[in-house]
Image (tube, rainbow, N blue to C red):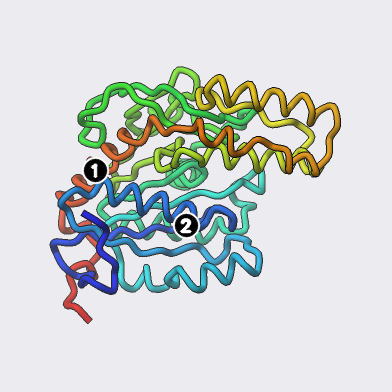
């Protein structure tokens, strides 16, 4: 069943789950991320009615175009505090500082974490947001990897939990420069639901007043998302913004695409020139891309929506049951 637009269905209906997306992604990824999440929730909702509201933290640095997009397409964050939601999805952004406290959005994100714990049934914290939430709650430090964890990785369920019912082995995209370690998480009372031999912890949770779900990976990604990030990093290399040529995404490109990319890398490293981007074989490579994690992501989010739907009423946002207005 498609998502029910906010303006077409009473957001206070007990039969409709109201999900808020706080999208803090960089400007270039704002629209794509919203499409990915909307598409994922649409597939995962089944017969369940789900409405989605878009928000972002105004403290996240943006260009004039980004500010204009947010102003036009997102609700003001004050409306989240006032109206509430049943559940929340919070994306990360590219890290700009070594310490969370030095990020321009840190205090606003802390307020959001505390608010979500008191006003939602469950909240999903993605990538940087997962590290930030674990740091704020339990002072768990993220660890710099020294390289980009980038690609599609095999993951295994580690314990039984309703969130991973029906899942045993699956693939998930990861794209990050930092990690949180299993030992620190377990010592602080987190449950690790899945791990990857190469990528480490995948999904972990902590039951507070709200069920907090932490994703180090990106199950919401579509088939071209990692390719888009690779091209962005390639462009930064050719423009002289990055000194290192980007590594190929693990487990993502087939042999045809890999051969094309290695051939282009040989030319680009021999003659570093932004004009080479015009010769980049994007169409050939894009035609080879698939999303083998798609069904797993749908299943995971379907399980999550079921957990939200059956969550204790005392934890739901009070406004979820107000009369229509």
Q: Nearer the viewer, residue 294 or 281?
A: 281
- Whichever of labels 2 and 1 marks the residue nearer the N terminus, that label is 2
| Image coordinates for residue 269, horizontal then vertical, percent | 81, 28
In the rendered image, is residue 127 in sight? yes
Q: Residue at x 38, y 51 (%)?
A: 37
The dot on residue 23 is 2
CA gap between label 2 and label 1 equals: 20 Å
SS label for mark 2: loop
- Crowdedness near tag 1: few (<14), some (14–19) or many (≥20) residues, C-alpha within 10 Å: many
Q: Nearer the viewer, residue 11 or 293?
A: 293
Q: Nearer the viewer, residue 165 or 240?
A: 240
In the image, taking residue 143 as reference, residue 212 lies left or right, namely: left
In the rendered image, is residue 187 in sight? no
Q: Which image quarter: residue 259?
A: top right
Mark 1 = which residue? 302
| Image coordinates for residue 288, horizontal then vertical, percent | 50, 30
- Quadrant placement of the N terminus: bottom left
In the image, taking residue 296 as reference, residue 221 lies left or right, namely: right
């Amino acid at each position: 069943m498609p998502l029910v637009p906010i303006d077409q269905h009473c957001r206070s209906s007990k039969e409709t789950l109201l999900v808020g997306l706080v999208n803090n992604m960089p400007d270039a990824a704002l629209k794509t991320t919203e499409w990915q999440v909307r598409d994922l929730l649409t597939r995962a909702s089944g017969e369940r009615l789900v409405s989605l509201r878009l928000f972002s933290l105004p403290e996240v640095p943006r260009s004039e175009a980004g500010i204009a997009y947010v102003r036009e397409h997102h609700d003001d964050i004050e409306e989240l505090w006032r109206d509430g939601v049943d559940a929340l999805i919070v994306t990360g952004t590219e890290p700009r500082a070594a310490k969370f406290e030095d990020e321009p959005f840190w205090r606003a994100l802390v307020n959001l974490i505390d608010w979500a714990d008191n006003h939602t049934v469950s909240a999903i914290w993605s990538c940087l947001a997962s590290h930030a939430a674990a740091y704020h709650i339990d002072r768990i430090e993220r660890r710099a990897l020294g390289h980009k964890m980038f690609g599609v990785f095999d993951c295994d369920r580690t314990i039984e939990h309703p969130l991973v019912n029906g899942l045993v082995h699956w693939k998930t995209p990861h794209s990050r420069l930092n990690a949180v370690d299993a030992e620190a998480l377990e010592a602080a009372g987190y449950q690790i639901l899945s791990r990857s031999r190469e990528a480490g912890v995948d999904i972990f949770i902590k039951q507070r007043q709200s069920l907090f779900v932490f994703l180090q990976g990106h199950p919401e990604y579509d088939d071209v998302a990692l390719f888009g990030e690779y091209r962005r990093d390639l462009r930064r290399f050719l423009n002289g913004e990055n000194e290192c040529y980007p590594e190929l995404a693990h487990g993502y490109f087939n042999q045809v695409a890999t051969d094309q990319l290695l051939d282009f890398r040989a030319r680009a490293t021999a003659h570093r020139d932004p004009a080479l981007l015009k010769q980049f074989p994007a169409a050939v490579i894009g035609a080879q891309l698939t999303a083998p994690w798609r069904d797993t992501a749908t299943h995971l989010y379907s399980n999550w929506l079921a957990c939200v739907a059956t969550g204790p009423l005392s934890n739901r946002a009070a406004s979820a049951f107000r009369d229509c207005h």
